[in-house]
Amino acid sequence: MIENQNIRVAVDAIVFGYQNNQLYVLLIQQKFGSKESYWALPGGLVKNDESLQEAVKRELKEETNITVNYFEQLFTFGDDIFRDPRNRVISVAYFALVDSSKLKIKADSDAENVQWYKVEEIPALAFDHNLILKKAIERLKAKLTYEPIGFDLLPKEFLFSELENLYCTILEKEIDRRNFRKKILSYGIIQETDNFSPVKTGRPAKLFRFNQQKYNALLKEGFHFEIKFA
Amino acid sequence: MIENQNIRVAVDAIVFGYQNNQLYVLLIQQKFGSKESYWALPGGLVKNDESLQEAVKRELKEETNITVNYFEQLFTFGDDIFRDPRNRVISVAYFALVDSSKLKIKADSDAENVQWYKVEEIPALAFDHNLILKKAIERLKAKLTYEPIGFDLLPKEFLFSELENLYCTILEKEIDRRNFRKKILSYGIIQETDNFSPVKTGRPAKLFRFNQQKYNALLKEGFHFEIKFA
DNA sequence: TTATATTTGTGTAAAATTTACGCATTTGGA
DNA sequence: TCCAAATGCGTAAATTTTACACAAATATAA
């Protein structure tokens, strides 16, 4: 056992949000005195007595005042020894999805600026955070096709067209509206509500809701969610 | 920046091999004096000036004398603060596949016993290594269905029946021999050779070879490998 | 020499799924 | 009252998956 290992362990959070046909990611900017620094993913060093999951939740809360229930481990970045020029730091990256209600909260502590950025308009980030984000987007795209996670980015009750647009937007693909609807409905994991959406124009649309229990039940039977495109 | 972080960073290697319809994993047993300890995955602490990938390759070489080209990052285990009772250690786990020729090499340094274990007959391992292995097996199963990695476990030239048995064995499923063959051949990623296998009984079988270049070319066109079962 | 056991190699029809595509419905506003 | 805009549904064609059986090639035993 080498006793002189000098490597720090950090966590970073990639938090995705969705609104108005746009995918967003949560970034912070640390205020060093008066000078502004790069934007970066929320994150920081892990404490000795907390789990990695606890660390990422804590850092997110501290830096953005946002609370997230479920984080999925994305990847551990540690092959570039100089990814942090100050010290050897490896970072365990986690990603999370939040519904649009969280997008309105403009958390702003004294220590940092916090902002939702459109993923299409990400600036040059600190460290290797552009790389981390790229990997997170890839994972998000992949997961969207084989797990019903799109619902996590939408309000509890949503329109079919919103779901459809979410898929089109994030996956950057065309979709046949009718076949998409048929497919999703055939799984039986979303249910109609009695509510209608207040739309400005066109025929009023039913609001739908994801049925988590039904999905869990299907999973036990070996069900496998999948959305493919031509 | 906290300066008193006291967390060690380790890597662990899950190396899978395959022979005679059996999936194997490489384990080591450290010799502490005369007393024998638990079997464990190869691995150890990362050095300050090496990447994570380098670390796992080095440890594997040191402990088992086996060299592996490609490691894929599996997961980082760090939520259980006491997974190593001596210190807080997080471990970045990597997995690799080797062809059956490596199974014969019984590497054995002075410091440790090295052995290939059938995954069906894994003993209680050190630390949380049973958990890590479980996760690795899940990943292997999943990957087998959506990436052509089965070939990595077979010799360069192999029989269709070997490939078929590999899938049946690892995924623990029945398979229709004819449909499987049709499916794989339809992808055009494996090619016949002029060689035949020296079999003891039955009709002699052609040897096949995975065509990596063809697969890479198809990938660029958006091809997606997939093997599903009823 | 012949019969037998054993494993490889191939084809086809039915079923299921995916794709392509059009039109009626409902509302707000001109 | 007509029009614009978006929702909601159905069907035929194409493709993919599934189920299933028999001939071919070799070694061995009779």
Image (cartoon, coloured by chain):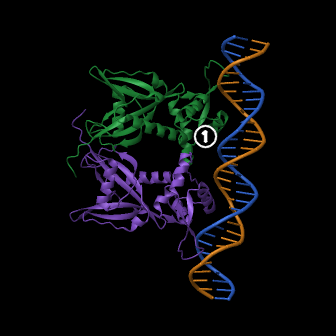
Chain colours: A green, B purple, C blue, D orange
Q: Is residue B155 above or below residue D18?
A: below
Q: Which residue is mark 1?
A: A229
Q: Position of residue A142 (x, y in %)?
A: 51, 41
Is residue A87 visible to the viewer in this orientation of the structure?
yes
SS for callout 1: loop
The foreground one among A33 and A48 is A33
The answer to whether B70 appears left or right of A6 in the picture is right
| Residue name at image x 33 percent, y 21 percent | A109
- Chain for disc number 1: A
Q: Position of residue A211 (x, y in %)?
A: 56, 35
The answer to whether D10 appears left or right of A57 in the picture is right
Quadrant (top left/top right/bottom left/bottom right) for the C terminus of chain B: bottom right
- Indicate the quadrant where residue A37 lies: top left
Quadrant (top left/top right/bottom left/bottom right) for the N terminus of chain B: top left
| Residue name at image x 50 percent, y 55 percent | B212
Is residue A70 visible to the viewer in this orientation of the structure?
no
Q: Amino acid at mark 1?
A: Phe
The foreground one among C10 and B110 is C10
The answer to whether A64 appears left or right of A98 in the picture is left
Q: Position of residue B11 (x, y in %)?
A: 32, 50
Q: Is residue A229 above or below residue A122?
A: below
Q: Position of residue D1 (x, y in %)?
A: 79, 13
Q: Crowding near pointer 1: few (<14 within 10 Å), some, many (20+)?
A: few
Q: Is residue D26 above or below residue B173?
A: below
The answer to whether A223 appears left or right of D11 in the picture is left
Q: Is residue B9 above or below residue B201?
A: above
